[in-house]
Image (cartoon, rainbow, N blue to C red):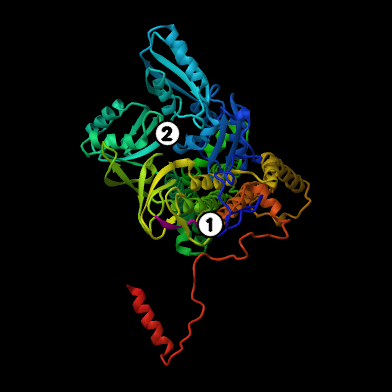
Amino acid sequence: MAHLQLTALAGGAGDEMEEVALLGSYDVEAGPVAASDEEAGMRRVQVRVAGMTCSACTGAVEAALSARRGVRRAAVSLLQNRAHVVFDPALAKDEDIVEAIEDAGFEAEILPDSTVSQPKSQKTLSGQFRIGGMTCAACVNSVEGILKKLPGVKRAVVALATSLGEVEYDPSAISKDEIVQAIEDAGFDAALLQSSEQDKVLLSVTGLHTEGDVDVLHDILKKIEGLRQFGVNFGNSEIEIVFDPEVVGLRQIVDTIEMESNDRLKAHVQNPYLQAASNDAQEASKTLHLLLSSLLLSIPVFFIRMVCPHIPLISSFLVMHFGPFCIGDLLKWILVSMIQFVVGKRFYIAAYRALRHGSTNMDVLVVIGTTASYVYSVCALLYGAFTGFHPPIYFETSAMIITFVLFGKYLEVLAKGKTSDAIKKLVELAPATALLLLKDKEGKYSGEKEIDASLVQPGDTLKVLPGSKVPADGVVIWGTSHVNESMVTGESVPISKEVSSPVIGGTMNLHGVLHIQATKVGSGTVLSQIISLVETAQMSKAPIQKFADYVASIFVPIVITLSLLTFLAWFLCGWLGAYPNSWSAESSNCFVFSLMFSISVVVIACPCALGLATPTAVMVATGVGANHGVLVKGGDALERAQNVKYVIFDKTGTLTQGKATVTTAKIFSGMDLGDFLTLVASAEVG
């Protein structure tokens, strides 16, 4: 399973992996780029956007974000319901990004895992240190001078009165512990109070049954140093926390909650990908509920119109009058009103939001088409009730349009869910738990504890049993074994591992027990970077899609214009007698005849296919590629791939499946082949 890029071929079997060369910084719009100096201090977030239905919606969201002060770049994915935003944290905040999207008429939520999407090497942290032992200005100058000489330190300011020092530093060049050590080496006491770094995580908590439990949890969280803010959702038993990883570790927070509550409360890190899958499932369930409701109400309308007139007993009942109205017409009016304004309420809300901000989308077309049919039918019904002349009514038209559109929406939601399967499969490559080796005060191993793999911290010593997966990137510090790294390198031959050998998270340990020291966790692991690359590629736009987005942005106004022209053309033709009267119904007129053509133009002209076709193709292609070990860097690479004539594999002359299979069985004695295979199967059972 060879990992390839369509922009470069992977190395041969003997090549050592470059640390992150394969997964370098990636620009959502332009493809792979080096991080520019202009974006060194930028913040990157991913936002879940609800309510988008077509590419006109994504254009509206991108326009709203781009217009916001401080936003450097914004890319919106319709299929993933996500926006990837790069902005200057000095000019804008997370709340401003959410507000911009909500002002455009959509619901927005910053994803908890989005703060780790930016490599630390591109950040400059600001740390506040308590410095003890300073007595005069000379001490201050001494500490400042030492700090400014440290590699990676950009700025250092020390205050004697408050015994505090503020240091701006590059965490990829120097750590907080090294800064503390440098101050202590100069003869002063030092400790980190807080840094500008922060992570946002969603924890699910078991044991939250009463308001008293919530109060206990509040008291515990308030005492944890480094915890910036938290919010408790009692209904979902979840807490969203923002913490400073330079001061407190996630595992320490989880352990503190369990210890302080005497094991009554237990916290678990929620996997953001499983949460996204849950959101997809909820959206699919909600859409299915609306579809079934519309279908159950539309079927009686259809029967009253098409079937019941041919059944004498029912027909005679339906033509009976209830006041000035026929019972059949009254029933259709009631049923269709429920479909139009209860089931179809979502279309009106979405269309209002779009029009309020000067944009148009598919919902506008649906609302115009169905409302025109409904309003005409109501007017015709009232006109017939008070004049005795009964023009035809078309209630079933609006009912069936809404039902068919909801059916299309449901299929669309299912398609969206399936396109993210590749990401889920990549996430499942990483183990859910890890065996942490515990140390006593003397530094000796005193036991082991099974923990959530997401709680592994750099420097932890982990035990990897034979047949289990490596929980994080690290280095072997004890033991020898062979590890199957084919998921990353494509090389089927197991790699020998001994002390000081590097290991990759998600790979399979085959034979011996290994003790490894974690060096990279979370977003820093190779597997996480592969997942990030696939996600980024799925959000990228192929050149042809940009053209489709432009067409979609002017599509709705053009359709409405064509619909009006269609109405005027047929109405004028009817008024001038250009077509025979037999073309229209006996009780109809040229106005109704023209209106039906006009509604048809609006209804069949749906820009969904235009906006969904290319991103669906990109997502499916990158997903299938990821499953087979091929990393595709975006839609532009896929679009150019049609011109590829030759693919050269540098894999020492062989391409394998990575596992042996039996091709032929031969017996060189008198034993029957079937009996021999029975014995082999018996031996294999154990």
Quadrant housing residue 539: top right
Q: Mark yes or no: residue 410 visible.
A: no
- Badge 2 marks a residue whose secondary structure is strand
Q: Is 482 in the magenta?
A: yes
Between discs 1 and 2, the one toward the N terminus: 2
**Position of residue 203 measured from the top left corner of the image (x, y, whole percent):** 35, 38
Name the one closer to the observer, 41 or 341.
41
Quadrant of the drawing holding the C terminus: bottom left
Quadrant housing residue 228: top left
Q: Main secondary structure of the magenta part?
A: strand
Point out the stretch of residues depicted in magenta: 480-485
The numbered dot on residue 200 is 2
Judge from the rendering whether residue 365 lies leftward or rightward of residue 502; answer left or right.
right
**Position of residue 325 measured from the top left corner of the image (x, y, whole percent):** 49, 47
Task: Tell me: residue 508, above or below residue 376.
Answer: below
Task: Tell me: residue 85, above or below residue 451.
Answer: above
Q: Mark 1 sits on what residue? A: 627
Judge from the rendering whether residue 369 lies leftward or rightward of residue 311; answer left or right.
right
- Badge 1 marks a residue whose secondary structure is helix
Q: Residue at x 57, y 44 (%)?
A: 23
**Position of residue 158 measured from the top left corner of the image (x, y, whole percent):** 45, 13
How packed mark 2 is, by other alpha carbons closer than 10 Å (few <14, some 14-19, many 20 or more), is many
Quadrant of the drawing holding the N terminus: bottom right
**Position of residue 29 measured from the top left corner of the image (x, y, whole percent):** 64, 39
Q: Residue at x 32, y 45 (%)?
A: 436
Q: CA distance from mark 1 to mark 2?
A: 29 Å
How packed mark 1 is, by other alpha carbons closer than 10 Å (few <14, some 14-19, many 20 or more), is some
